[in-house]
C-alpha cells in the first residue's frame, strides 16, 4: 500500500532551502508517524520500526534520542512485573 502526503510547492521550496530532499522528507514523515503510533500503543516496536523503515534496534535508539521510553508501564503493569520477578527470584532461592 502506498500513502501519499501532499505538500505545496511553496512548502517544499521552504524545506529544500534548508537542504531537505524529497527522500529526507519522506523518511522523516515515516519515522514521526511510527513514533506517534508506537507512543499511542497502536504498534509494537517491531511494527513501528517497519513503518519507519528502520531496524528494530535503530528504532529503539530513535525512541531514546526522542526521549520516548521503550517500556511505558502504568502502575498496575509495573506491579505485576515486579511480582513476577519476585516470584521467579523466590523460586530460584528455594
Image (tube, grey):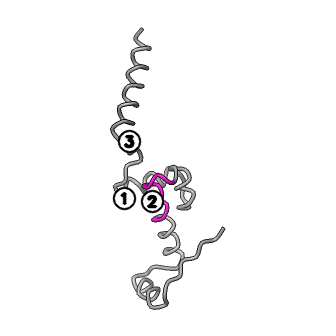
Image: magenta residue range: 32-42
Check the picture and name the quadrant holding the N terminus: bottom right
47 or 41, which lies in front? Answer: 41
Q: CA distance from mark 3 to mark 1?
A: 18 Å
Residue at x 42%, y 55% (from the top left corner): 39
Residue at x 45%, y 91% (from the top left corner): 10
Q: What is the crowding at mark 2: few (fewer than 14 residues within 10 Å), some, or many (at least 20)?
A: many
Of labels 1 and 2, the one closer to you: 2
Q: CA distance from mark 1 to mark 2?
A: 9 Å
Q: Is residue 30 above or below residue 18?
A: above
**Disc 3 target residue:** 73
Q: Is residue 78 above or below residue 85?
A: below
Residue furthest front as drawn: 76
Residue at x 57%, y 57% (from the top left corner): 50
Q: Earlier in the sequence, mark 2 or mark 3?
A: 2
Residue 9 pos. (x, y %)? 49, 90
Mark 3–mark 1 CB contact (< 8 Å): no
Q: What is the crowding at mark 3: few (fewer than 14 residues within 10 Å), some, or many (at least 20)?
A: few
**Disc 1 target residue:** 66
**Disc 2 target residue:** 35
Q: CA distance from mark 2 to mark 3?
A: 17 Å
Of labels 3 and 1, the one closer to you: 3
As helix, strand or loop, the secondary structure at mark 3 comes to loop
Check the picture and name the quadrant holding the C terminus: top left
Residue at x 50%, y 54% (from the top left corner): 42
As helix, strand or loop, the secondary structure at mark 1 comes to loop
Q: Main secondary structure of the magenta part?
A: helix
Amino acid at each position: 500500500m502506498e500513502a501519499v502526503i501532499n505538500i505545496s510547492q511553496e512548502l517544499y521550496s521552504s524545506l529544500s532551502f534548508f537542504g531537505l530532499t524529497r527522500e529526507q522528507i519522506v523518511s522523516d514523515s515515516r519515522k514521526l508517524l511510527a513514533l506517534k503510533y508506537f507512543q499511542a500503543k497502536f504498534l509494537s516496536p517491531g511494527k513501528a520500526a517497519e513503518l519507519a523503515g528502520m531496524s528494530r534496534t535503530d528504532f529503539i535508539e530513535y525512541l531514546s534520542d526522542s526521549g520516548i521510553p521503550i517500556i511505558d508501564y502504568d502502575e498496575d503493569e509495573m506491579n505485576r512485573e515486579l511480582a513476577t520477578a519476585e516470584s521467579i527470584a523466590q523460586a530460584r532461592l528455594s
